[in-house]
Structures are given as C-alpha cells and as structure tokens.
Amino acid sequence: MTEPRSPGMSSIQTGPVHTDSTPPAVEMDPVEYTLRKRLPRKLPKRRNDVYVNMKTDFRAQLARCQKLLEGGGHREICVHGLGLAINRAINIALQLQASSQGALQLAANTSTVELVDDLEPEDPDEAGEPMTRTRNNSAIHIKVFYPDPQGP
Amino acid sequence: MSAAKVKMRGKKLRNQPASVQYPSSPVNAESSPKNGGDTPVTGVHEGPSDVHPFTARPKNPHQRGGWVRGHHKDGGGYAKEMSKYLTAGPFARARAAEVRTMLKAVTKTTGSCHVFGALPKHMRRRAMSHNTKRLPRRLRDAANRMREKSLQAGSKKKKEQAKSKSRKARRRHGNLLLEFNRRQRKNVWLETHIWHAKRFHMVKKWGYCLGDRPTYKCYRPSYRAMTNHCLLQDLSYYCCIELQGEEDELLAALSQLCSKEAGPTFAAAVCLSGRRQGSVVVYRAGLYPSQPLGPVTFLWRPRTQGSTHRQLWIWAHPNMKQDLLPELQAVCQCCEAVVPPVVTPAEVVPTIEPEEKPEKTAEAMSMTGTKRKRTLKDAGGPPAKKILGDGTRSPTTPVTWKSSSNGIVINDLTMEIVRYRLIGPQSNSVLAETVEAATDCDEMSKSQPSSLWWPEHCKNETKMNLHRQQADVFHILKGLYSTGELPSGTVLGLTVDDPRLTLPTKKVKALPCVKQAQEVDEEKRRELMLRGVPEHCCQSYLWEQSVRDNVTENKISEQDLNRMRSEVLVPGSRLSPTPLQGRVPVLLVHQPGKQQGHEMSSWGAGWDLLLPKGWGMAFWVPLVYRGVCIGGLNMSLKHSQNKGAPHFPHDYPDCPAGVRFQEEQETQLLDKFKRRPPAKRTNYIKHGCLAPFCCPWQQLAEEWELISRHGGEERKGDQTQTAAEADALMTSHGDIPVTKPPSPVTVLRNRKSLRLLSGWCRPTTSKGQRRCRIGEVPPLDHSALTSFLTVHGMSLVWVRLTILSKGRPELHAMVSAPTAEDLKLLKKESASGPQEPTHKDHFKSRIRRRKKAPKKAATSPLCRDEAKGKESALPSASEPNPATSEDAKSSSQSPSHLVIGLWPDPLPSVTAHCSRVTLGWVTQGDFSLSAGCGEALGFVSVAGLLNTLLNQPMEHRGMLLLRDPTSLHYHFAKINIEV
C-alpha cells in the first residue's frame, strides 16, 4: 500500500519531442529511455499494520487507525510510511496520541527501502537490454501502543 | 362494414357450403320468387329461424321476418307484397335444397376443430384434450382419433428421442464419450469444459464452448482475488501458431507485420533472446498504420548453441486467427500445405487412443472381473476420446505449411497447448504450492531404456544440470511476495511433478510463507528481481513436439492414480516413489499488470502456465484446491478494463475481428431491444442518441476531419469554434459527398504521438485532484495541431474517462465537448453537469401512419394515394429543422425498416446532432472498483479532441462530458490518455 510518490512513468528525454510530421526521417536518439517504477516490495501484512499512502484521504486513514485501536481490539498497531508519506505517517501517529489523552505511546523506527526502476529503451531493437536500476528511499515504521498496565 | 367485421364474416363462412344463398333474383320467376328465399341464409345463427318455414305453412315469411335479427339491406321480408299462390313442386325443392345446406353447415364445425368445441361452455373441463375420459362418451372416439393424429404429427420430428436408451445406458462411459464427441462437433470444448459447464454460464463463441461467468455470485470476490490473492482463468482457446526457420528469415518476414513506432516489435532484443514474452499489434503486411489485424503475444524459444534455427510461438485470439494465418503464410511465403499424416499432431490423438484403451480396460477387467459386457463392446472399437486437443478438426486438414524458398515452417498448434492464467499478487504462492520441480528418477530406472521421456532425460548430465538450475530459480520465486516484483514478461521453463500427487485433502487458501522466504538467499533474489531469469533457464521441453506427445500419451489416468493411492500403506500419504510418467514440462510466463498510466501500476500482474495438452484437468483441480477464484470471459473483460487496456475484440474497431464483433453486438442489442414491448422501449431519438447499438466510427472520423479542415481555414480569422459553428458546418457540408475516397479509420498506436497527446490532455490522478508530473511537452497551439492532424486526422485514440461526480457510464455512452458555459458550471461546488434538451421524434408519427396505411389500402386504393400524398407533403411542412427534414427524405426511401425509437439507417451528422459536440463513444463503462468512481474506456476522434482541447482554458483542459444513451444528463469527466 505504501505509495511514496505517484509511481508510474515519466520520460527522460534528451531532446524535445517532435510532432510526427516527419517520423521516418528523424533518427531516434539511442539513449532515450522510458522510466517505469516498480512497486516497492511487499511483505505479508498483519491485521494491525497500516501502510500510509498519499492517495487516500488523511481522515480516512486516521479513522482506520483509531478503529483498529479501539474497536479492533489491538493493543498496538504499526504505521508505515515510505518517502513522501513519512510526513503523513508521523502526523497520523501524533494525532492518535493526542486524541487518546496520553494513553498511547509511540516508538518510531526508520529504515531504508530499496526500490527498483525499469528503464525501457524507446527503440528496443537497437538498445538491447532494458536496464534496471535501484535507488534507496527512507521509510518510517511507528509502533503506536498502549503501554503495559504493570509498567511504571 | 368495417374491415374487422368483414374478416370475421369471411372466417365464419369459410367452411360453409357455397350454395347457401338461395337464388332470390326475380329472374328465377318460375320458382316463386318470394317464397322464403328472400332473406339470404347467412350463417348458422339463422338456422333456428329456418327450421320453422320447413314445417310451417307457406305464409311463413311474415313470421320469419320477425325472427331475423337486425336490419337487412334488401328489405328482408317485411314490406314485400305477398304472392297470391305458390306451386308445391318448386317450393318443396327449394326447401329441400335449403335443408341440405343447413344440415351440412350444422355438421361442419367452424373455428377450432377441437372436439370439445361441440360442448357447451359449462360442460367443458380442464385438460380435456389431454385426458379424453373427461369428455362425454359420445365424443370420446372422435377425440381419441384427433389425439392420435396430433401425436403422430409431433413424433415425426423427434422419433429418435422416443427410442432413446435408458439413462444408465446413456451414462455408460463409452456412450457418454460418443455423446460428448457429437456435442463438440460444432463448438470445440476445452479440457476443463465439464468442470466449467457445471459451474458457469457457457457461451458458444469463436468455435469454442467457453465459460462466461459463474452461476454463483462472485463479481466482487473476483475483483478482490485479482487485487489481493489470485484469479484463475482457462485461456486454452487462444490459438498458438508456431513458426520455425532461420532467425534472419523469420525476422525479415515478420518485420513487415508491425512497426517500431508502435512499440517493441518481434525483433526486440529481450524478446528475441527468449527471456521475455512480447506483445505487438499486427498489421497487414507493409500497411502500417492502416489495416491492423489485432494484438498478439509472442514467445521466442531461446537459442540453442551454434544454431540459427529458431522457433517462435505467436498466440492470437481465435477471432483473429482467420485473418492472421493467411497473412503469416503470405509473409513467409509458406503456401505448401504439408500432408497431415506426416506431421500433424491432431491425428495422433485418434489413432493412439483406441489402441491404448482396450489394453487398459482389459487390464482392469482381469483384475476386477466385472463389467463383462463392456469388454465385448470395447473390442469393437471404443470411441476415440476427443476431449484432448482439437479432435473435431478433420485429420486431413492441413496444419503445417512449408515454404520452399526460405525454409520457414508454419505450424498451427491450436489446442495443442493448454494455457492457464493466474492473475493477482499471490499467484506466485499458488504456483509454488501447486507445482513442485520434478524429482530425479532413481538409478535403477535410469539404467534401463524406457519409452518415457524423463528417464532418458535423466541420463544426460547437462540436461539435469539445467533442470537443477531451473528448480533453483523456481525456489527463489517462491520467496517473492508479489508477482509485481518481477520484470514484466519473464519466462521460466520448468519440469514439474504431477500436481495430483500433492493434492491437499481440503481446499486451502495458498498464502505466502514468510519463513520460506527468509531462507532464500537475498543476493539471488535481488538478482532475479533486477535481471529476471537467466537465458538458459528459459528453455523448456514443452517446445519439443516429441516430448509433448510423449507426455500426453503416457499420462496416468485418474483411475489408475486413485488405485495407486488406495494401495498406499498410510492412507493420505504421498505416493513414493513418484511414478515415472508424472513429469511434465511446463513454461511459466509472467504477465505484466497495468503498465500504462500513473496509478495502480502492475495491478493484475500474474503468471501464465503453459502445459502440454491432456494435462489440463490434472493441473486445474490442484490449482482450484489452492483457494483461487475462477473467472470466465466476463472477468477477463473486467481485468483489462481495470488495467485500462483495450480488450480484444471489443476495443479494436479498426480490425476485421473488431468489426465482426461490433456487428454481432449490434444484432444482439437490437434483438434485446426489440424483445421489450414497444411502449416500454427507450426512445433513443428523443434522447438524441443516434447509434445506441453500434458506433459509426468511420462517419465520426470523417466528419471531424471535415470540421477541422474547415476550422483550420476559418481560424486564420481567429475565431473560436463552438458547437453552433460545427452545427452550421455540418449542415452545410454534411451531405456533400467527400470527393476523395476516405481512408478507413484507424486507432492511433504511434507511441510518440500518443505521448504528445497525453501531455496535451494535462494528465491528473484518477479523480482529477492532482496533476501528474510529465516530461516537457511542446505547447498546444495551432501550428502543432495542424501538423499533428495532417498525419493523424482520421484517427481515433483510446482514452480513459473518469467521472468526477456520481454516475456509472454505460456501453456506448457519448463523449462530448463541453461549452464555455458548461465549464463555468464546473467552478461552482456541487454542480452537476448540463442537460440535453429532449429531441423530437418525427419518425414516430410516420410509423403510425404507415401502420394504418395498409388497412386503408385494403379498403380502397384511393385512400392509399391520399395517405401517400399526405406523407410526402408533411415532412416539408411540419419540420422546420433542416437536419431532420433531410433525414425524413432519406427515411422515406426505406420505409419498412423503421423501428420506433431508433434512427433509420442513413444517420445525420453524428457530431452535431446534440447540443454538445460529440467526440466519440464509450466501449466499456462501469463503476471501477479500483478507482472508486465511474470509469469509462472508449475512443474519441483525434481531430475532435484536439480542437476541443485547444479551445479550453488551461485550468479546465481535458474536461469532457459523458452522457448515457438512455439519459439526457451530462456528467463531467476527466480524460486521460495513457501511454
């Protein structure tokens, strides 16, 4: 569910795109690639994992977390955010804590996630191999939990 | 007398003797003219009145006058003066003639000839014709006779069925097979047919019997399966065509069929190496960009060392095979059909099976000693089981074509390979649970020669090495959580054990196993994700015909397998050692999910499982036992709809198969429309919908081309084009025949142009909230537009429309361009779209008049002329609208085809018919479960779209209107062109 940015495709193009008035005459640049981002790796999800994205409405995501903690009977939930959604994940966790009047505690962890991009040549016959490259992106995993009653 | 009365009377008198009218003319003077012959005996109801005069005295006419019902034109017997005398002879003769005819009339029944018609109403009983004992005895004989007669007439048609065997006999295996073979003579069955037929609504399409949708409710579960788990489909009906030959020759031949502009071709480097499956839209040789045939997927066999001989499989939809195959033959210059007995695998089936079966049954017989009857029967030659492969094809039909000039061989492998499609992120784990890499065979069986392929295979060390590597890759595959993580189109060859051996006792949902995944070497997993499967691992023995046949022939029958299972010491444990026959070469082909667009990328990715024929059910049931959902044709449509991809043949209006499909769909929809009572039908004319059943793409493109050409000329004076202007243009130019022959409409598939268009549409996220980042796009202006339109003026473009408010678009909904006022509406919150004013149906009255006309014609020819005169006079008088009057003229040429609520055939201008200019139509529309709003996929005219975009302000660019054929309400929708 983690959606760092709108994943998808954009073009890295060396020159301005020609209108196709003279298509066969223009020789294509061999270094023209289309970038296509693959989805981040997905791990099996538990019930109390919440992956935060930028597409769903913020209130809906917050309500989902609250439901899990209150109605769902979970003592703890994990809020994950990747890339752009880190901000929102933190926001959700803090909102949860604030609305619980201090009953909830947070424990945040950060990590690095490896993402894969496919570079597809525009002219596959010449350029041969489609390339892949990896890049890293930051992620945050916030555990939101009720502290044990026998604790201090 | 009205026509109905005349008709009634005619019916009544049909069976009456002709001489009932007693001559009453004064010419017959000698036979006492007024002697009771004065009132003509017109029917049975006058019978009673006639009985009297017979017995009564001659002055009866007075009395009779009182008896006669109603007024008679000739004055009846009232006022006529009485004759003074009468002669007995002629009078008696006349009465005798009357009596005779009367008696004749009484005995003859009119109307229905049922016996109980003779009974008064209160004596009739229910089901009298069925049970003659309910009739009074005097009528029974006649009724029995009647009944026998009708039975005989009925039984003539189904005499065979009456003599059919008992159910037990019919269900006996051999007879059942015969029956099955008979039933699939016309429409071929897939291997999973019987499984599907029990659970699905079956449809007969493209020469196959296919499951359309399950009988149980599972629309949403199926969608959820595609998003979260796994959906299984049987795609064996796809046709595989094999090409063999030198690589250069093949590439040279195939390069004529497609173009680089539309994306990777057959020669794409990754596909050529055999590591990826490719897909391409095929055109008629050298005719790109016109005359496309349809999309195909293709798979090259990896190179064998030191050989340039290559093998290529092209998978095509059965609907386009009839177009594709001749084209391939022409391109490869393969015209020599090879005589089938040499090569054809199709005839292998019937010849081998009959020999094999008796052996098997004989074995079973000797063991159990039952079913003696069947042995005798089977010895006579059991029916060949045609369920395998395309058994309905006659064995002499050529399936192989050879070329004498370049050595290319084309092989039609239809129904030779089973193809299952698993869709969804968990198809990985389903496959991993179902399929296990083949186990090595033990030393003993290795040492002795065997007719089976696997033991022979095991002797070769290099082959075993390859197998081990493939098994390793498969093991790593198990560690992946989702199918979307792999490079799209990856191919993996594998040899697997018979999955029936590891069939779980209960259906369990296959889930990814975290533990197993962690065992997998991280480094190798990364390698697989980035690079895909190494080239040599893509090799599979499924490519070899001999191995395929060997595997198919030596499959352990279900019966034998069950027997072996029952003999296992611990019930339910795995058979060991694995029987030698149970090794199957398979190919796993990764299917890329959603590749276009910015959202939901790699949704619906999955695996295709290719199997040798005959093994269909052996893999199907184990897959089903892993908790997958099963989908039919309907689901594959929904799958491509959610992917935003055009679905063949629905969304290929420029391909011959697509055209055929559209015609079919039109007749289907029209039939459905006509099944409703006329008063309950939608009046599409009033809704301003010209083509509710079939979209006139050609006309649309032509009209837009004309508009844009004229618009281009006028724009020099810097005018903005509005609907009214287009209207004016169309009315002035619409009926002028285009001078040059119009080029056929095509769908724009040129990638660069598509990208350009997509940029101009200002792509946003699905509901239009956020802009997506795109590369730099040259601004849309007049010069760019004209240069674009000179190339693609007659093209359509595939678009996705997302409705911004509520609403669910339907099939053939209209895509229209909003006016400037409409866009102002958009700024207001909670504003719904504009309304189309109701159109007037001028045809309705015309149809009514036409219906009345024939009746008038029946009564008087003068009347008809009058009606005609009125008709021809009316349209010009009553219709001020020039567009409709023009149609009226055209419609009067084809009067008999008018249907209320539908436009007659020569359509008026499709673009300018409504208050908003029409740009195109929707071919697939539904509520999209993935986007959470109504989504439509369809085509719009490129010229129309660009002209509209150009006139829209930047912030509203790409905003269009959508209107259902049955509604007058326009919805705002955002257009997206995905590349």
Image (spheres, coloured by chain):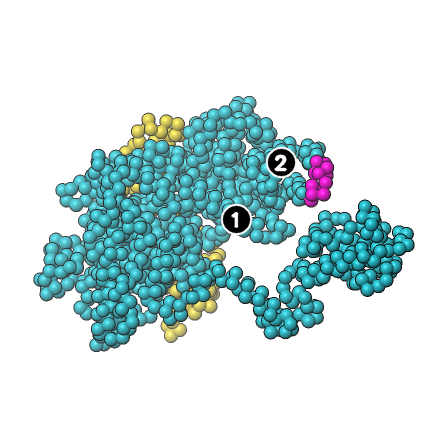
Chain colours: A yellow, B cyan
The chain to which mark 1 is attached is B
To which quarter of the image does residue B845 belong?
top right
Q: Is residue B963 magenta?
A: no
Question: Quadrant of the image for the C terminus of chain B?
Answer: top left
The location of residue B247, given as percent across then percent down, is 21, 39
In the picture shown, does residue A30 fall above or below B768?
above
Quadrant for residue B310, please give it.
Answer: top left
Residue B511 coordinates in the image, percent (x, y): 32, 63
Chief SS of the magenta region: helix
Residue sitting at 59 percent across and 30 percent down? B731
Whether pointer 2 and pointer 1 mark residues with C-beta atoms closer than 8 Å, the reply is no
Residue that badge 2 annotates: B892
Name the N-terminal-most of marks 2 and 1: 1
Q: Residues within 10 Å of mark 2 (few under 14, many from 20)?
A: some
Q: Position of residue B62 (x, y in %)?
A: 88, 58
**In the image, is B624 to the left or to the right of B522?**
right
Chain letter, disc 2 residue? B
Of residues B558 and B11, which is closer to you in this image? B11
Kind of residue indicated by mark 1: Leu
Image: magenta residue range: B855-867
Q: Residues within 10 Å of mark 1 (few under 14, many from 20)?
A: some
At label 2, which amino acid type do we have?
Ser
Magenta segment includes B864:
yes
Residue B98 percent coordinates (x, y): 76, 58
Q: CA distance from mark 2 to mark 1?
A: 25 Å
Do we see residue A141 in this rendering?
no
* Residue B908 drawn above or below residue B233: above
Query: Which residue is denoted by mark 1 in the rendering?
Result: B669
Of helix, strand and loop, which one carries label 2?
Answer: helix
The residue at the point 20 percent across, 51 percent down is: B544
